[in-house]
Amino acid sequence: MHTFVLVVHIILAILMIVLILVQHGKGADAGASFGGGGAATVFGASGSGNFMTRLTAILTALFFVTSLTLAVFAKKQTTDAYSLNAISSVPTAPAKSAETSPTAPKSSE
């Protein structure tokens, strides 16, 4: 899931960069970006500004959602890595006492 969200995040970032660079400024003519005045009718009577502005807003909202999702994944991964539950305890055999051990030195009384 983490990889899928990361791939979507990168694709959204690239799409946003391309879409923002294609847009024209407020003072620019609608036909200046597309090479002619007739090209503005492709996006409807209002021109390309309204369509591209809405598309940019949608991509930005999705980008924020994927950013927050990746932040949650990163926090969970960091918490799991540094928690005490991640440390595996190996059960050890109880230590033998010195009195029952055959190699223990005999005490002279």
Image (cartoon, rainbow, N blue to C red):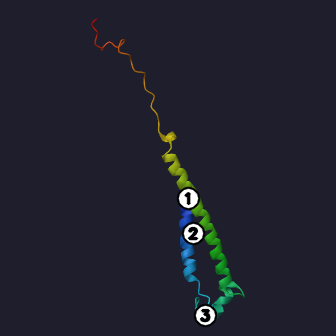
Task: Examine the rendered structure and indicate whether residue 29 appears above or below residue 69.
Answer: below
Foreground label between 2 and 1: 1
Position in image of residue 3 (x %, y %) = 53, 57
- Distance from the alpha carbon under mark 2 to that under mark 3: 29 Å
The three-letter amino acid code for the residue at tag 2 is Leu
Secondary structure category for the residue under label 1: helix
Q: Secondary structure at mark 2?
A: helix
Tell me the quarter of the picture where residue 30 sits.
Answer: bottom right
Along the line of sight, the residue nearer the viewer: 77 or 15:
77
Please tell me whether mark 1 or mark 3 is closer to you in this view: 1
**Which badge, 2 or 1, comes first in the chain's sequence?**
2
Which residue, given by chain and number where applicable, does mark 1 sit on? 71
Return the residue at label 2: 12
Q: Position of residue 78 (x, y in %)?
A: 50, 51
Lateral position of residue 54 relative to residue 1, left or right: right
Q: Which residue occupies the extreme bottom position in the image? A: 37
Could you tell whether 82 is left or right of 60 in the image? Answer: left
Q: Quadrant of the N terminus?
A: bottom right
Residue at the outermost right position = 45
Which image quarter: residue 104? Answer: top left
Q: How many marks?
A: 3
The amino acid on which the numbered mark 1 sits, given as a three-letter code, is Ala
Q: Earlier in the sequence, mark 1 or mark 3?
A: 3
Q: Is residue 71 above or below residue 55?
A: above
Q: Residue 95: where, in percent of width, then height?
A: 40, 21
Disc assigned to residue 36: 3
Residue type marked 3: Gly
Figure check: 57 above or below 99: below
Q: Quadrant of the C terminus?
A: top left
